[in-house]
């Protein structure tokens, strides 16, 4: 089990997160079911954090990428296996946990594998406008330093990232633009604060160097076109199964250093398609690096995602606290 692989520091972090959530917990007015704002269903995107709170489970998310050789090491192929779970405390307040197992296959040297740092998050959905198909949330993501394996790149320090998340459907466009109504935009904007400004490194020859850890601007968004929305609320085009549940999407996941030596933006562009059923969603996307620092060649990622609030509406899929 993942918990058995975590050191005591990570387990303590989980406890602290739970206590923090209970302290800030407050009842609020009822929000719409997960991923909905009026007629708009926002699917669970893979590379971009969702703007809503929900009871969901991603098991698994699998990705494959290549990275070119650099001063830090040889070229490497990376395969990740991730699990993420989100749970509503109230209709508007939710928490999340995630773990990723990484397998690194360098062009030179032995294969390395291990867990990346555990992730925890808190999110509050404070705005929902059904008529304008809009959602806005605020939250904090915690990359728990020291909870992963150093040989696969897990940092010994934590990074705290407060962020704002948004979703906007275009169903309120005029009649002459009705075929644009299935479009929706989701995204997030946050700043990553590392708990350590720099790390002193010593190589095999005993030479010392300093690796600086900048604050980063994390900016992500996804543009999607909903075939189910087109069929149900614009015009029935006669599209049959399984294509009638597909949502083509292009995601942009970017990170820009702000200080401490800075450096350029890194990130990926992920075009793909989501298939959203009643109880689960399947996603498949290409992973295209925006520059050499972000990777080499085209990778891919796939995800099987479960809607727990639809699968178990009277038990696991209910908020822990009712209004």
Image: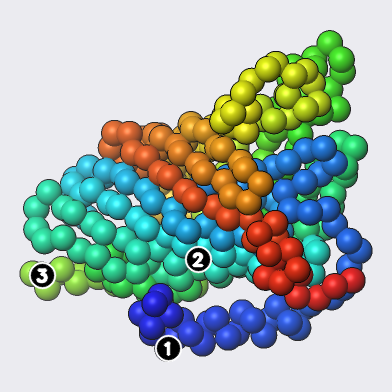
Which of marks 2 and 1 precedes in the sequence? Answer: 1
**Foreground residue among 191 and 281:** 281
For the C terminus, the image quarter is bottom right
Q: Residue 273: give x, y in percent of width and height.
A: 52, 33
* Of labels 2 and 3, the one closer to you: 2
The disc label shown at residue 287, or none? none
Which of marks 3 and 2 precedes in the sequence? Answer: 2
On screen, 10 above or below 259?
below
* Of labels 1 and 2, the one closer to you: 2
* Of labels 1 and 3, the one closer to you: 1
Q: Residue 7: give x, y in percent of width and height.
A: 38, 84
The disc label shown at residue 98, or none? 2
Report which residue position mark 1 lands on: 8
Q: Left of 209 or right of it: where is 232? A: right
Q: Report, in whole angstroms, how far the alpha carbon at label 1 lies from the one at label 2.
A: 17 Å
Query: Going 42% across and 60% down the picture, which residue do you hit?
Result: 82
Does the residue at mark 1 contact the one at mark 3 (Cβ under 8 Å)? no
**Foreground residue among 52 and 10:** 52
Which of marks 3 and 1 precedes in the sequence? Answer: 1
Helix, strand or loop status at disc 3: loop
The disc label shown at residue 204, or none? 3
On screen, 186 above or below 79?
above
């Amino acid at each position: 089990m993942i918990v058995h692989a975590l050191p005591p520091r990570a387990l303590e972090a989980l406890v602290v997160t739970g206590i923090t959530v209970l302290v800030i917990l407050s009842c609020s007015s009822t929000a719409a079911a997960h991923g909905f704002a009026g007629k708009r269903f926002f699917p669970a995107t893979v590379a971009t954090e969702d703007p809503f709170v929900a009871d969901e489970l991603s098991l698994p998310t699998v990705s494959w990428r290549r990275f070119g050789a650099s001063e830090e090491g040889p070229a490497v192929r990376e395969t990740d296996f991730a699990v993420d779970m989100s749970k509503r405390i109230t209709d508007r307040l939710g928490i999340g946990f995630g773990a990723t197992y990484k397998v690194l296959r360098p062009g030179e040297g032995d294969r390395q594998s291990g867990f990346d740092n555990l992730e925890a998050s808190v999110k509050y959905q404070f705005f929902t406008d059904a008529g304008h198909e809009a959602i806005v949330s605020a939250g904090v993501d915690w990359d728990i330093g020291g909870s992963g394996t150093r040989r696969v790149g897990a940092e010994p320090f934590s990074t705290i990232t407060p962020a704002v998340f948004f979703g906007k459907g275009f169903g309120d466009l005029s009649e002459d633009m009705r075929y644009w109504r299935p479009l929706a935009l989701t995204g997030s904007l946050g700043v990553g604060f590392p708990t350590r400004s720099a790390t002193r490194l010593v190589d095999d020859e005993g030479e010392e160097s300093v690796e600086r850890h900048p604050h980063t601007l994390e900016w992500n968004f996804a543009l999607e076109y909903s075939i189910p929305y087109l069929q149900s609320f614009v015009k029935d085009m006669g599209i049959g199964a399984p294509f009638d549940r597909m949502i083509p999407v292009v995601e942009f996941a970017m990170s820009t250093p702000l200080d401490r030596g800075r450096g350029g933006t890194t990130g990926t562009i992920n075009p793909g398609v989501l298939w959203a059923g009643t109880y689960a969603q399947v996603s498949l996307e290409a992973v295209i690096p925006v520059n050499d620092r972000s990777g080499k060649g085209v990778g891919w990622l796939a995800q099987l995602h479960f809607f727990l609030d639809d699968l178990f509406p009277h038990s696991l899929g209910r908020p822990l606290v009712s209004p």
